[in-house]
Amino acid sequence: MRWLSFEANGSESYGVVVGDGIVDVGARHSHRSLKDLLASGDFDSVGQEASRAKPDHSLGSIRYLPVIPRPDKILCAGINYKAHQEETGRQATAHPTLFTRFAVSQVGHEQPMLRPIESQRLDYEGEIALVIGRAGRRISKANALAHVAGFAPYNDGSVRDFQRHTTQFTPGKNFVATGGFGPWMMTPDEIGDLDEMEVITRLNGEVMQQAKAKLLIFGFAELIEYASTFTELAPGDVIVTGTPGGVGAARNPPVFMDEGDTIEVEVKPIGVLRNPIAVG
């Protein structure tokens, strides 16, 4: 099942993709957002009901929002594929490298990612994001995947010069509208073998990154276990799991995104996140 958040007729809502249309779950239920539905405990039953309904909107008639527009937390894993670790010259660590994003830094599918006027170094990072469906603290690795509602493509766009001003990543990861998230999340039952998910990043049609999830240094369950040690994970929280090798900053010469470019992050079998690049 594919869940998304969107805007239609000037109002925000959320729903389920059925064929080439969307069943507007927000218009049918009292839960105000997908995050609220996840927190209610009604996610599975409402989803089953929606999958049998007639679509209310076509995919082409809506404005895509980030899958979870206003998550309580966005936790991002850095240096989590060996090829990316090697191209950045970083050493292996015993624990995941985590940093945070703010909700205002996210944009939905087909919405412009912005290269800020302060920098010429907006880089792509194609990733797999997971969305927490059930709250938990000190979650064991064995039980971690039971807390996942779904997975989605993510572009952890990075303003490299600001990222490297100090050892802290936060400035370079939080410029407004630099993180693409969408077009939807897919529930694990529909994905099948999670390790076989494959992330592919294309800049203007050219493949720049490609790797399967089984190559993650710290896997989905390990990231959930570690993150839930220091914070309680809540429904709708997002964990962005890391980017493969091939980022623009590591190329010779470097490749950065600019106005007029189109960046795509495909996660097989979920779908393709596409964003034009603008300046702002």
Image (cartoon, rainbow, N blue to C red):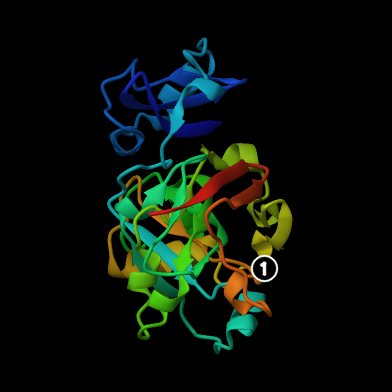
Specify the quadrant of the image occupied by residue 138: bottom left
Specify the quadrant of the image occupied by residue 65: top left
Q: Quadrant of the C terminus?
A: bottom left
Numbered disc total: 1
Question: Residue visible at 35% across and 63% down?
Answer: 174
Query: Which residue is label 1 attached to?
Result: 215
Question: Residue visible at 62% across and 43% down?
Answer: 272
Question: Residue visible at 46% across and 17% down?
Answer: 49
Q: Secondary structure at mark 1?
A: helix
Q: Is residue 213 left or right of residue 277?
A: right
Q: Amino acid at mark 1?
A: Leu
Specify the quadrant of the image occupied by residue 178: bottom left
* Residue 20 image offset from top left, x and y in percent: 61, 20
* Residue 228 image offset from top left, x and y in percent: 35, 64
| Extreme residue toward the right, this view | 206
* Residue 132 image offset from top left, x and y in percent: 40, 49
Question: Residue visible at 35% across and 26% down?
Answer: 13
202 and 56: which one is in front? 202
67 and 204: which one is in front? 204
219 and 244: which one is in front? 244
When the figure is inspected, residue 4 is found, relative to residue 117, above or below; the finding is above
Q: Is residue 92 left or right of residue 204?
A: left
Q: Is residue 152 visible?
A: no
* Residue 33 image offset from top left, x and y in percent: 31, 32
Q: Is residue 235 visible?
A: yes
- Callout 1: 10 Å neighbours few (<14), some, many (20+)? some
When the figure is inspected, residue 95 is found, relative to residue 214, above or below; the finding is below
When the figure is inspected, residue 85 is found, relative to residue 8, above or below; the finding is below
Q: Quadrant of the N terminus?
A: top right
